[in-house]
Image (tube, rainbow, N blue to C red):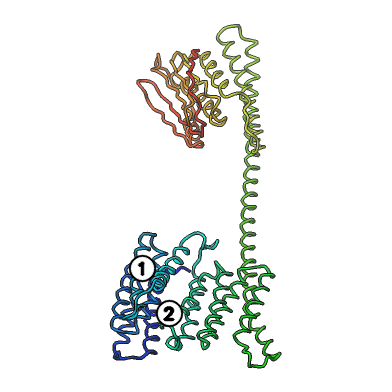
Amino acid sequence: MRWRGLAPDVLLAVSGIALDLLMSGKAGGPSAEWRVPLFATLVGAPMGLVRHRPVSVSLFLVGVLVYTDQIGSFTSNTAQILLCVALGATGYRRGWPVTLAVVAVGALATGLNIADPGIAFTRNAWFYSVGIALLPALVGRYLRGPAGRLEAPEITPDVLLAGAGVAVAVLGTWPYWHTGSQPAWVIGSFFVGAGLALGVARRLPAVVFAVEGTLLLSAHQFIPEATATIQVTLLMAVGVFAMRVASWFWNLVAYVTASSLAAMVVINGHENVTALRVVLLLVVVATPIAIGRYAGARQSAAEAERLRVRESERLAIAQLHAGQLAERERIAREVHDIVAHHVGAMVLRAAAARYAAPDGPVADALADIKETGHQVLEDLRGLLDLLRDPGSDGVLLADPADVVTESAERMSAAGLVVDLHLDPALSEAPLVARASAARIVQEGLTNVLKHAGPGTTVRVGVVAGEDELVVEVANGRPPTVREPLPSSGQGLAGMRERAKALGGTLTAGPDGGGWRLAVTLPYPHPHPQPHPQTKVTT
């Protein structure tokens, strides 16, 4: 549940109006009866906008405070209390410059409200005025910061606690706000603060417990009629403390402290201390602790269940991954067996034909077929080993640079004119990038031989940049028009997938009568010193 929409704004406006009706209606005075609801609406209705426009509401309440104070209306007490709430919202919603500017204006209005006609305004009075305006703004800024956030930043329980605390404090004490020696808005702010403090009890349980205990002693000293209400907010703070603090030692400390405070307030010196009275007091204090520990245990169990579910999901994913790897290994074995059977038969036939054929181009081609077949079988075995052990470092059977050089030599023997450029800094690139580059060069040269034919000039370059590996295979115009060799059409798609797997790009297309293939393979690089390129022409 999130506090969004119109309902919270309406609730704030209604609460502000109700607060002034309680205060002004109880105070009486020369104001006409029709002015009481009018002023209550004037001061309370803007609270419906305090979440969205706290600065505007604060300045409006400053104006209402000054005006009602000048005409002697009791609505000034309500305006002073609501101004503190609006300043807290300003601190929560706005930055420091705007907050401090609004606090300064609020402090001036508070000073005018405190000042009595004909009496000099002392330094203590100014300090009091600034503190009243600054404290709620600081609380708002604190709640905005990360130090005031729970692991799960859900504010609904905090709002409910604060609302319940304010309701209990106001409804239980408002008849006595005009009976003390202090102005009614001071006493009202005292009790409203006691209720609002419960809104941060989940974040600061020990601090709020101490605050509520201090407020209880203060109320017992100055407004004895309101001590029963503050006792209720203290017991609410004790329950939240027990819910948030799992240590039984500290819960025992809180229990003894709360029981002592309750005894000081409830049991006066002239009354007899009976066993029944003591038992009832201890039971009353123990009840919120028992409820709080039960709620805390339920929260801990729910969190443990969430952790168990997450761990089960992780294990299920791991099992699924293991099953996928096992299936890949099975498929790899089948592919190995099928391909190895046919390639092995081809190698045996080529070897037999090599011995039967006379020396010459045919014998050289048969020897090349035999060596290539052996290399294919070795590569298949290496890939199968890699699939069987995904945690291996993936070391190739040959260095990628040697693979590129060997491919260039083999294609030169097949009739291509290969111009090979290998960057000396290539060894500094990650192995996976170099291996992919080697396979791309192999496939690129094979495509040139298939589609352009012998006699075609091919330029091959593999360069290691600062953070990427650049591969280029470009051929010129074919010397003769020829029928291309059969092709599966998957070579270019396979190269594109290799590049995409490493986050790279591949471009291929006609280039001046020939064909150009360019691939970029990015990788993190420690920015090596530049090396001069060497040129190898085969």
x and y percent of residue 240 in the render? Answer: 58, 73
The mark that comes first in sequence, 1 or 2, is 1
Residue at the (49%, 70%) spot, across then down = 156
Give the SS element for disc 2.
helix
Residue that numbered label 2 is attached to: 186
Name the amino acid type tagged 1.
Pro
> Disc number at residue 225?
none
Residue at the (61%, 22%) spot, across then down = 373
Q: Is residue 526 above or below residue 452?
A: below
Question: Callout 1: 10 Å neighbours few (<14), some, many (20+)?
Answer: many
Residue at the (65%, 33%) spot, across then down = 384
In this view, the residue in front, 147 or 331, is 147
Write down the quadrant of residue 377 in the picture. top right
- The answer for how far apart the CA atoms under marks 1 and 2 are is 22 Å
In the image, 305: left or right of 155? right
Residue that numbered label 1 is attached to: 54
Q: Is residue 507 above or below residue 423?
A: below
Write down the quadrant of residue 427 in the picture. top right
In this view, the residue in front, 216 or 112, is 112
In the image, 20: left or right of 532? left
Q: Is residue 480 above or below residue 82?
A: above
x and y percent of residue 520 in the render? Answer: 45, 30
| In this rendering, the label closer to the viewer, 1 or 2 | 2
Give the SS element for disc 1.
helix
x and y percent of residue 180 in the render? Answer: 45, 86
In the image, 325: left or right of 480? right
Q: Is residue 523 above or below residue 28?
A: above
Q: Does the CB distance between marks 1 and 2 fall below 8 Å?
A: no
Question: Callout 2: 10 Å neighbours few (<14), some, many (20+)?
Answer: some
Name the amino acid type tagged 2.
Val
In the image, 464: left or right of 352? left
